[in-house]
Amino acid sequence: MSTWFSDLQAKFILDFVEKQRYIYIVEGLKVTFEVTLLSLFFGMLIGAVIAIIRTTHDQTREEARKGPGHMILGAADAVCRLYLTVIRGTPTMVQLLLWFFVFLKNADSKILVAVVAFSVNSGAYVAEIFRSGIMSIDQGQMEAGRSLGLSYKDTMLEIIMPQAIKNCLPSLVNEMITLLKETSISGYIGLNELTRGGEIIRGVTYDAFLPLIVVALIYLTIVMFFTWCMGILERRLRRSDIR
């Protein structure tokens, strides 16, 4: 037992203490957070816009008069459907490589490429999450807003969307967790995020166990923290509903 512990201690010193190799993990974690948070922010913007376009098209299709506005909305809905089909039907890693080697091959920042790729990818899933949340709101809410003199846009932004986001929070947190873990493939474009930091240490020390275990534990800790925060938020929302 003491021999095993001594060997583990020696490997820990070799992997993280010598030549301050722990910095690869710390710097990689910073990059992972940066890519995740920026991608989530822009992905939510993309998803919200697409969700509003699609639900507006579906809800006003029967009552809208044929005209330029309806045709533009129909074209936008068709583009959104194509976007959702392509993004959800292709692997995230292939999309990342396409952005890096084709669409943004002249970009100076690998972080920019990763943020664009993951934002576009996450936006497709967030759009469906938002759309399901909007569709879950009773149609009477929209009719009540319109009867008060609000326009469709104001009713959507001030009445429907706040309730939809509240209903979508658990799914949005799950998407954030998925996005956090998906950033681990950024090493394929040479971005030194958390997983690649562990891989760099493994390549130097030829020890795979500790670096990868530490990386896995960091991901697990972050996910558990997000899950804990989500539980607190849900309890507060339930108390506000009771009031």
Image (cartoon, rainbow, N blue to C red):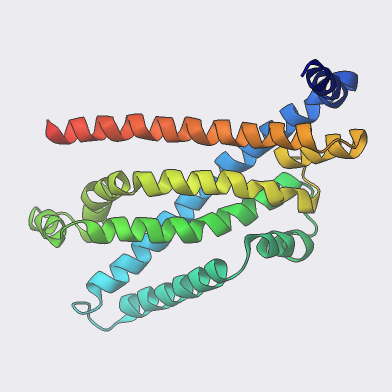
Which quarter shows the C terminus?
top left
Q: Residue 3: percent from the left, percent from the top? A: 83, 19
Q: Nearer the viewer, residue 196 or 214?
A: 214
Q: In this rendering, would 101 be left or right of 75?
A: right
- Can you say whether 47 is above or below 18 in the image? below
Q: What residue is drawn where x is 66% and y is 38%?
A: 32
Total numbered labels: 0
Which residue is located at x 35 percent, y 68 percent? 54
Name the residue at 60% across, 53% down. 118
8 vs 148, left or right, is right
8 on left or right of 115: right
Residue nearest the viewer, comparing 146 with 234: 234
Residue 195 in the image, given as x and y percentages of width and height: 73, 41
Figure quadrant of the N terminus: top right
Percent coordinates x, y for residue 160 in the rendering = 23, 52
Which residue is nearer to you in this view: 66 or 20? 20
Q: Quadrant of residue 103?
A: bottom right
Res. 17 visible in picture: yes
Tell me where residue 196 appears, x and y as whole percent.
77, 42
Residue positioned most to the front: 1
Residue 41 visible, this angle? no
